[in-house]
Amino acid sequence: MVLTAGTHAGTHAGTHAGTHAGTHAGTHAGTHGNGAPGTSPLLATALAVTQDATAGYWEPNAILHKASKPPTDLDTLDYLSPQRRHQILLSELSCLFNVKKKTGDKGAVVSLGTTPLSNIEKPAWDFTEQLKLVRGYSDLRTDRIPEILVQLDDIVSFFASAMPMNPYHHRKTIQLISVVHALIVQIEMHVKHYCWMARPAGFATQVQPVIQTPDHSTFPSGHAVEATALAAVLHWVRTGIHLGEVSATADRPMELLLAHRIAVNRTVAGVHFPVDSAAGAVLGATLGEAICSLHAPGTTANPNKMNVRHFTATENTFGEEEDFLLSWLEKTLNNTNVGPAVPETPVLFRKLLGAAIGEWR
């Protein structure tokens, strides 16, 4: 068994925000530095000696020269390092979304502005049938262990392999995915808090996951939320089409295939029920499409549109015996309601989204 700090909580708090986002969740230097290469003790000492030898005693008033020019356009972040841009964009986006507890502690409601995007209600089953599905998926463990272990803290590479995101040709897309990923992790953890449910191993000792069981709620699956959200954003940036608009066709987007497999691998590993992935995928697709709705400035008279989806684990939506099948996901994503987005969209993120679109279409 691999016991790492890359449990789902540690991974998402540190690795996704540190490795993929390269921001404040990383090192102290990464947060408070200036984006330049780190300074070693030897270099710092050498600079101090050089300054003393060349500058000597000096009077500011006598030799004051013109300071560096300030940014001329505060609607662009190009003058900043990738880490600083990420922090500002994440702050801008985080202000738009909010998560609240459903009445009766039944789940969570995620909203964009004042508009509810997704009501996620946790199931009230004994989980006998879902455990049977977990038992069946365990037969795939030997084949999928490499994927399971890599996906503990890296799902982006799987999308980057299918949609080659060259760091030179797709700089804005990579930055967009980094910011979106960090935002989704924040939201999903808040939702999990209000939807707390025990992991499969908490129901049956025979589950014996091949990775360490995370400390946070099994419901909804964070990997499903993230993978489907990234799939929705990437597919829309590349094609201008939402996942729900193509899910009823025979031509399944590769992004959707990857998101589904990443989610299922968590059940194979023994740390999620299929219903966790179902709820996570519904939430992820809805969040991803809502983020895409920010591509153009809206007005009170003409707001942007977004898809609204809810998940309740009942016989009408997802029964206890039901599996998280790709056909179910396609049908569910295609069944949406349309509501208004926030009247005004953030300028800085809108520019990044537009620049990412320009790299593909």
Image: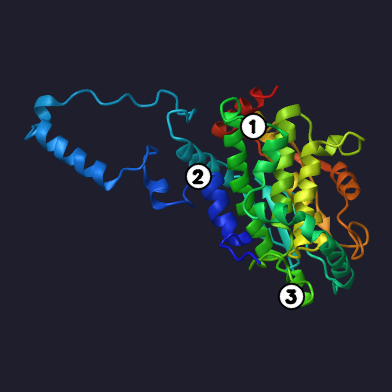
140, above or below 67, in the image: below
Circle 1/circle 3 CB separation < 8 Å: no
Q: Whole-percent x and y of residue 328?
A: 90, 50
Q: Whole-percent x and y of residue 55?
A: 11, 32
Q: Nearer the viewer, residue 144 or 287?
A: 144
How would you rate the neighbour count of disc 1 (Cα within 10 Å): few for under 14, some for 14-19, many for 20 or more? some
Instruction: Say which residue appears at 87% left-offset and 39% top-offset.
Output: 247
Q: Separation of disc 1 and disc 3 at Cα?
A: 39 Å
Image quarter where the C terminus lies is top right
**361 lies left or right of 76:** right
Determine which residue is flagged by label 1: 165
User: Could you tell which of marks 1 and 3 lies nearer the N-terminus?
Assistant: 1
Determine which residue is flagged by label 3: 202
Does any portion of residue 302 appear in the rendered image?
A: no
Of all residues shown, which one is farthest toward the bottom? 205
Helix or strand or loop: what does disc 2 sit on?
Answer: loop
Determine which residue is flagged by label 2: 22
How would you rate the neighbour count of disc 3 (Cα within 10 Å): few for under 14, some for 14-19, many for 20 or more? few
User: Could you tell which of marks 1 and 2 lies nearer the N-terminus?
Assistant: 2
**289 lies left or right of 247:** left
- Three-letter amino acid code at disc 2? Gly
Q: Separation of disc 3 and disc 2 at Cα?
A: 34 Å
98, above or below 157, in the image: below
